[in-house]
Image (cartoon, rainbow, N blue to C red):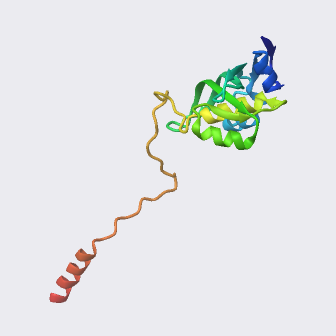
Amino acid sequence: MSEFQRPPKIDVMQAGLASQEFAGQDLLLNYERLMAETNGLGAQNGLDWSVRGALQPGQTGQPQAWLHLSVRVSLPLTCQRCLGLVDVPLQIERSFRFVETEAQAELDDDASPEDVLVLSHDFDLAALIEDEVLMDLPVVPRHESCPLPVKLTAVDADFEEAQPKPNPFAVLAGLKVSSEH
């Protein structure tokens, strides 16, 4: 197994042929889009990753290149309930099958349970890892149980409560009484 910090660019077919394995621990600060999601927090958080190449027979019996990806990271996100920080641990295990052309990838991707990508001689593992982490983020990050009570009301200091409007029928009734006298 080859040890790295930053995930390298690899030749996917060569990785499959040689059953190569790559692994490492990178820092969150090296992933611009993930840092944007965390509002710049957690830059020193470790991102553990590993990739294993393989060749497996395809539907036609011909060997196809595969990458098996594993990622583990914890991201400091904003809890949407209490607006405090919540550490969101992610554990990702995905397999990717590679085909020769973009057209073939589009055709196969809809019908396949695995993700289908296009073969490359300089496939960017770091970009794949960042994409997969972004897609695995929760839509609404939140604590299981918020550490502080959740404030359910908000009032501005200079807010004056509106006076209730009088019932129009009561106003009419008052006019009627006034005209009778």
Q: Position of residue 166 (x, y in %)?
A: 30, 71
Tell me which corner region of the image, top left, top right, bottom left or bottom right, holds residue 123: top right
Image quadrant holding the C terminus, namely: bottom left
Viewer-closest of 123 and 179: 123
Above or below, 34 relative to 170? above
Number of numbered callouts drawn: 0
Tell me which corner region of the image, top left, top right, bottom left or bottom right, holds residue 134: top right
* Residue at 79% in and 20% down: 15
Q: Is residue 129 visible?
A: yes
* Residue at 80% in and 19% down: 5
Viewer-closest of 76 and 49: 49
Residue 58 as seen in the image, left or right of residue 168 = right
Q: Farthest residue toward the left?
A: 180
Q: Position of residue 56 (x, y in %)?
A: 68, 21
Q: Farthest residue toward the front?
A: 60
Above or below, 13 relative to 177? above
Above or below, 38 relative to 70? below
Viewer-closest of 48 and 40: 48
Residue 156 as seen in the image, left or right of residue 179 = right
Residue 116 as seen in the image, left or right of residue 32 = left
Viewer-closest of 75 and 108: 108
* Residue at 76% in and 20% down: 16
Q: Position of residue 165 (x, y in %)?
A: 34, 69
Image quadrant holding the N terminus, namely: top right
Q: Position of residue 17 (x, y in %)?
A: 78, 18
Q: Is residue 52 visible?
A: no
